[in-house]
Image: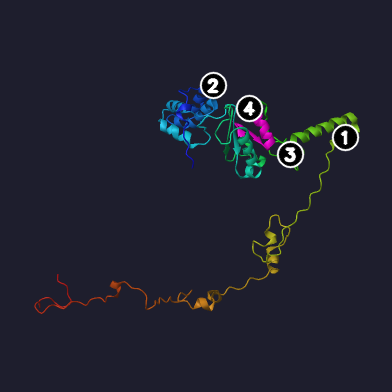
Amino acid sequence: MSVRRLAEASLQPASFAFNRANAAAAKQWIKKYPKGREQSAIIPLLMLAQEQEGWVTKAAIETISDMLDMPYIRGLEVATFYTQYQLNPVGTRAHIQVCGTTPCMLRGSEALMDVCRSKIHHDQFHTNDKGTLSWEEVECLGACVNAPMLMIFRDTFEDLTPERLAEIIDLYDAGKGATVKPGPQNGRITSEPANGLTTLKSEKAILKATRDRETRAATKAAKDAGPAAAAAASVPPAAPAAPAPVAPSNASKPKTDAVETNPALKSPSATKVAPAAEKAASVAAPLHSAANANKAEPQVEDVSKQRKGPKNKAEPASAFKAPEAKVKPAKAAKPSPGNRSRPTGKKPV
């Protein structure tokens, strides 16, 4: 991650103050946050300062931090973290941000940067001789369909060629940047296909207002032509016959008297028969045999755990047992020869 530092002290102005319009806008931004959370407004306030001065100065960061009652270091953290803030002076008439992400790169953004190098400065973030223009390479600007593109202040210029960018730079350098129309520079509208529309060429199919307008125009023309034409026009055209619905196939369903497959129980039912007649024509279900149901494959029957009958709890000889479980219970202690008063096998009271 690149280190972003403030401009040199020799370039920093002594003070900063919002003009009347931006001061009112700053108050509106601060009011959008609850009491005690006014510091969240630092991002839009820094953008207001950049739009006013062209770049974010140290004095602007400190003034905004005082407005929001926050330490200077917090304001410096925000300003140096986000690349949208220019920490050094940029062109007074235009700072050109050329997109260099993959879609624009594949469509010729390198050629656009070469134009900036030749007409402004060889290095990024440096102004031209008059201080009116500067440029930088940025990440995706969000108009990949119209690549290659760039942004000047808040306006985007898309579908660019090196020749067209050279013209735009000359216009901004001459102070005529307001005459350049933002958006695609090859004549297409927004992000439609470059070779023209191929679908949705007419609004008739999607706008009801257009269809209603045509119906009223046809009715008026028919009235002007005569009563017969009006009568013919009032009759709506016959709708094309809808194709007959295809019934679902029952090829994979067995014919039984079960509720799921009984056609007599469907609603609405195409088959009107009595359940007894349906049962007579159905295939009888196999008889239930508990013995057969309990049988399994020989490999399954050989296991120790059976479905019925006594459960054999055989355990291998090598099964682990706790040491205390292996100890045999101790026999009742015999009285010592010196104590003949205590009966054998009885506990003392």
Whole-angstrom CA distance, mark 4 to mark 1, is 68 Å
Image depth: mark 3 or mark 1 in front: 3
Q: Secondary structure at mark 3?
A: loop
Whole-angstrom CA distance, mark 3 to mark 2, is 44 Å
Q: Earlier in the sequence, mark 3 or mark 2?
A: 2
Q: Secondary structure at mark 1?
A: helix
Neighbourhood count class around disc 1 (C-alpha, 10 Å): few under 14, some 14–19, many 20 upward: few
Whole-angstrom CA distance, mark 3 to mark 1, is 28 Å
- Residue found 68% across the figure and 39% down from its top: 191
Q: Which residue is mark 1?
A: 231
Q: Earlier in the sequence, mark 3 or mark 1?
A: 3
Neighbourhood count class around disc 2 (C-alpha, 10 Å): few under 14, some 14–19, many 20 upward: few
What's the residue type where badge 1 is placed?
A: Ala
Whole-angstrom CA distance, mark 2 to mark 1, is 65 Å
Report the magenta residues as a range: 151-172
Whole-angstrom CA distance, mark 4 to mark 3, is 46 Å
* Tally of numbered discs: 4
Q: Earlier in the sequence, mark 4 or mark 1?
A: 4
